[in-house]
Image (tube, grey):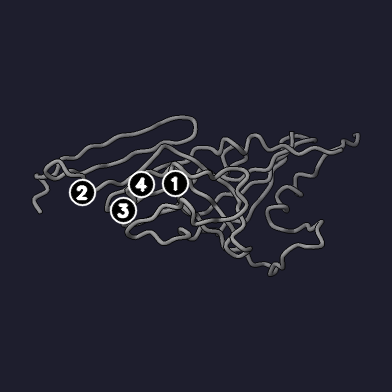
Amino acid sequence: MDDSLLEHKQGSIDNDVEYTTWDEYYLDGELVHRSAHVTLKKSPFSDLFAASLG
Amino acid sequence: MSNTQSMCTSFLGELLSATHNFSSSNPAHTANTADTFKAALYVTTATINAATTAYSATNEVSGTGYTAGGIAVTNATNPTSTNSSSTAGVGYWTPSGNLVYSTVTLTTAFDTVLIYNSTQSNKAVSVHTFGSQTITAGTFTLTMPSNTTTTALLRLSTT
């Protein structure tokens, strides 16, 4: 396939929980490839864990 | 010097290693052998949360290249613990490798991964959410956070 026929789109999300990027390739307007890469920065729930003695 | 009431930080790490057992109905463990953990993806309409007790195929993603139950979690680093003060500390663990779902097509949007113990009747461990995704003939990668007291994937802490 001639790669020049593909339209490439990229995007990202960056917040306290994740940094995510994605790549999309379209051929004649049709999505033919989409990959995503999510980096978990932190598990928000785990900060809620606390232990105590009676 | 003085004494200070506290839960021992080493205990937190040892909880993650099944060193202590207060129950008379616990499952058997093999010494010096970690259980096998897996990671399953769930669609955005699923209800996976703190009340989830075990892996279920209900509302799990499906599609080309994805096997029900998800993928194995790489676990080459034992849990550990670190004191933060005389009264507090953190036990923590993070998978030693990223979660990579290669060459998949997942057209129904998903936003959750469930970590569960496939050695122990698929019992649930933790739920992690992220922005909604779909994958088309591509790879979905979940990069694990740094394995530190403040960012590890699993942390048990005293304050």
Instruction: Tell me the kind of residue under disc 3.
Output: Thr
Whether residues under marks 1 and 3 lie with C-beta atoms below 8 angstroms apart, the answer is no
What is the C-alpha distance between the residues marked 2 and 4?
15 Å
**Pointers 1 and 4 within a single chain:** yes
- The residue under label 2 is which amino acid type? Val
- The quarter of the picture where the N terminus of chain B appears is top right
Placement of B120 over or under B42, stated as above or below: below
**Residue bearing the label numbered 4:** B108
Separation of residues labelled 3 and 2 (CA atoms): 10 Å
The local crowd at label 3, few if under 14, some if 14 to 19, many if 20 or more residues have their Cα within 10 Å, is many
Instruction: Give the side of residue B65 with respect to residue B14, left or right.
Output: left
Same-chain status of marks 1 and 2: no
Secondary structure of the residue carrying numbered label 2: strand
- Percent of width and height locating residue B148: 59, 42
- Of B154 and B119, nearer the camera is B119
Query: Which chain contains the residue that carries disc 4?
Result: B
For label 1, the SS is strand
Total numbered circles = 4
Residue under circle 1?
B143
Give x and y (percent) for residue B79.
Answer: 64, 52
